[in-house]
């Protein structure tokens, strides 16, 4: 394995930025110091003027394999992630077939081991009738990130609307419970009313009115009630409304929280006003909503009521997205550009680069108790990203690595560039070139 010495780079880690040398050897960060000299076969990289970040850890992606590989594969989307500075991902179970048995779950880990350039992990899925399979995951606490519950929002056969099933999951699962919270009852009622009024004239601009704030809050409130009742470890995904923020606190360190939350980059960037330009391209669940929600999300992110920044990366083909609103699927491809988008907000002065690293690397590692990742520390896995804040990145067809081949950011220039990405000490990506022989590792978790 090649060793690397990164010289004179601004290391962003644990709320401070300092110019250091960093030595990578045998897949790990061997040494961090003001000046390092080495002998032997070491590749030196001049980091002067650039920043070294721990690789982002995305706790919510949909890579579509197995069964939906016309949209994406684990291999293609992992490459896109690495090109954008994300070195580890946790993928959701709503594939085809859905990961509702231990056998199907482990099949995905085999695909990840064989094809993913990034580090990988996969959630166990929950349905109304697979509780016995779900609870078998208790024996895999150190190898599975958690169980995923679609609470009241239908996704194939994974809608969980049986209160007894929810009580059993929250009462008996020893793993983190990650929830998609939207009330199917409210959504159905709103949809019926909108169809009655507008028929086939519905557009993406109606999406946040159908999947509205109340649908999100009612479901999230139920999840919090169940978690408090059973002292469950609850993590609510993709918070999108101001009203839900009252459910979360910032009075204790993340490591001590039993109820945590995530915000996604598209809810921090777009508002309902953007449907006029993007239409179905930004149709997603939960919906991008009115602008006051975005401002509230930013405030809660900066004061630590929201714990993690993720993507909910969910690619669909261009043709699928061009269908009328009612037929067009929900989901946006985002994992390649999430770090760049947040660095844009750094350049605009809305968030510090240290806070971006905290929310995209440190916090996922803490929240999921990921073993020896998410920080720039001696002895940790060398999952690292070099970024240049003086050079821009223009998103074009030629440099979009998603299998679907499109991005809502196409034509946009981010004021930053990912130049190098290391996965377990291996140089996986360098200035537009991949080293596809690099393979990620299965994430492990430090849980009792």
Image (cartoon, rainbow, N blue to C red):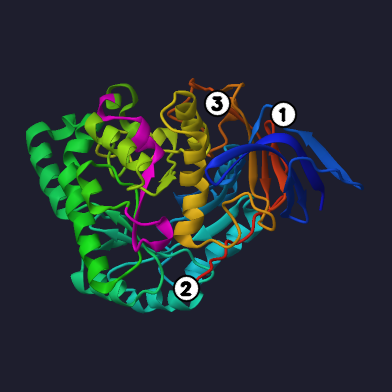
Point out the stretch of residues depicted in magenta: 251-273
Identify whether 10 is placed above or below 369.
above
The dot on residue 257 is none
Residue 51 figure quarter: top right
Give the residue number, with chain letter if any, for mark 1: 48
Q: Give the mark, 1 or 2, whose residue is nearer the N terminus.
A: 1
Which residue: 47% across, 60% down?
A: 368
Q: Nearer the viewer, residue 142 or 108?
A: 142
Residue 255 lies in the magenta-colored region: yes
Q: Nearer the viewer, mark 1 or mark 2?
A: 1
Please state the horizontal and vertical placement of residue 185, each as a whole percent of the image: 14, 54
Residue 173 figure quarter: bottom left
Per the image, label 3 sits on a secondary structure element best described as helix
Q: CA distance from mark 3 to mark 2?
A: 38 Å
On the question of residue 66 being in view, the answer is: no
Q: Give the mark, 1 or 3, whose residue is nearer the N terminus.
A: 1
Identify whether 250 is placed above or below 159.
above
Q: Residues within 10 Å of mark 2 (few under 14, many from 20)?
A: some
Per the image, label 2 sits on a secondary structure element best described as helix
Q: Give the mark, 3 or 2, whose residue is nearer the N terminus.
A: 2
Give the residue number, with chain letter if any, for mark 3: 397
Q: CA distance from mark 1 to mark 2?
A: 48 Å
* Direction from residue 39 to residue 299 in the image, left or right: left
Give the residue number, with chain letter if any, for mark 2: 102
Q: Nearer the viewer, residue 129 or 444?
A: 444
Please state the horizontal and vertical placement of residue 157, each as a whole percent of the image: 31, 61
Q: Nearer the viewer, mark 1 or mark 3?
A: 1
Residue 333 lies in the magenta-colored region: no
- Tell me if label 1 and label 3 are in contact, CB under 8 Å: no
Please state the horizontal and vertical placement of residue 402, each as a whole percent of the image: 53, 38
Which residue: 21% across, 37% down?
A: 208
């Amino acid at each position: 394995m090649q060793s690397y010495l990164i010289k004179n780079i601004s290391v962003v880690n644990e709320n401070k930025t300092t110019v250091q040398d960093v030595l990578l050897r045998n897949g790990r960060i061997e040494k961090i110091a003001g000046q390092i000299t080495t002998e032997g076969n070491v590749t030196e990289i001049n980091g002067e003027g650039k920043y070294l970040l721990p690789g982002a850890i995305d706790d919510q992606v949909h890579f579509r394999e197995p069964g939906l590989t016309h949209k994406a594969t684990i291999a293609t989307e992992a490459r896109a992630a690495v090109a954008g500075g994300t070195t580890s991902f946790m993928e959701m179970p709503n594939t085809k077939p859905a990961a509702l048995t231990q056998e199907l779950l482990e099949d995905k880990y085999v695909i990840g081991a064989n094809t993913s350039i990034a580090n990988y992990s996969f959630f166990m899925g929950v349905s109304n009738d697979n509780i016995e399979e779900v609870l078998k995951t208790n024996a895999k606490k150190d190898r599975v990130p958690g169980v995923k519950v679609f609470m009241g929002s239908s996704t194939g056969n994974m809608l969980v609307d049986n209160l007894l099933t929810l009580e059993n999951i929250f009462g008996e699962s020893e793993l983190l419970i990650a929830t998609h919270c939207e009330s199917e009852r409210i959504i159905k009622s709103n949809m019926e009313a909108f169809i009655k009024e507008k028929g086939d004239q519905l557009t993406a601009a109606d999406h946040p009115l159908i999947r509205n704030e109340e649908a999100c809050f009612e479901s999230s409130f139920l999840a919090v009630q169940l978690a408090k009742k059973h002292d469950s470890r609850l993590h609510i995904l993709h918070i999108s409304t101001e009203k839900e923020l009252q459910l979360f606190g910032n009075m204790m360190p993340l490591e001590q929280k039993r109820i945590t939350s995530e915000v996604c980059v598209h809810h921090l960037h777009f508002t309902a006003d953007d449907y006029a330009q993007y239409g179905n391209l930004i149709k997603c669940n939960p919906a991008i909503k009115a602008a006051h929600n975005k401002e509230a999300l930013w405030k809660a992110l900066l004061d630590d009521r929201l714990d993690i920044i993720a993507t909910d990366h969910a690619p669909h083909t261009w043709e699928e997205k061009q269908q009328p609103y009612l037929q067009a699927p929900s989901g946006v491809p985002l994992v390649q550009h999430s770090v760049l988008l947040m660095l844009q907000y750094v350049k605009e002065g809305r968030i510090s680069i240290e806070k971006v690293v905290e929310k995209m690397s440190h916090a996922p590692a803490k929240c999921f108790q990921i073993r020896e990742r998410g920080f720039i520390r001696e002895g940790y896995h060398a999952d690292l990203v070099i970024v240049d804040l003086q050079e821009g990145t223009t998103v074009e067809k030629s440099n979009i690595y998603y299998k679907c081949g499109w991005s809502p950011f196409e034509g946009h220039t981010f004021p930053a560039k990912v130049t190098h990405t290391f996965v377990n000490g291996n140089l996986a990506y360098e200035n537009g070139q991949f080293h596809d022989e690099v393979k990620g590792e299965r994430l492990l978790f430090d849980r009792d």
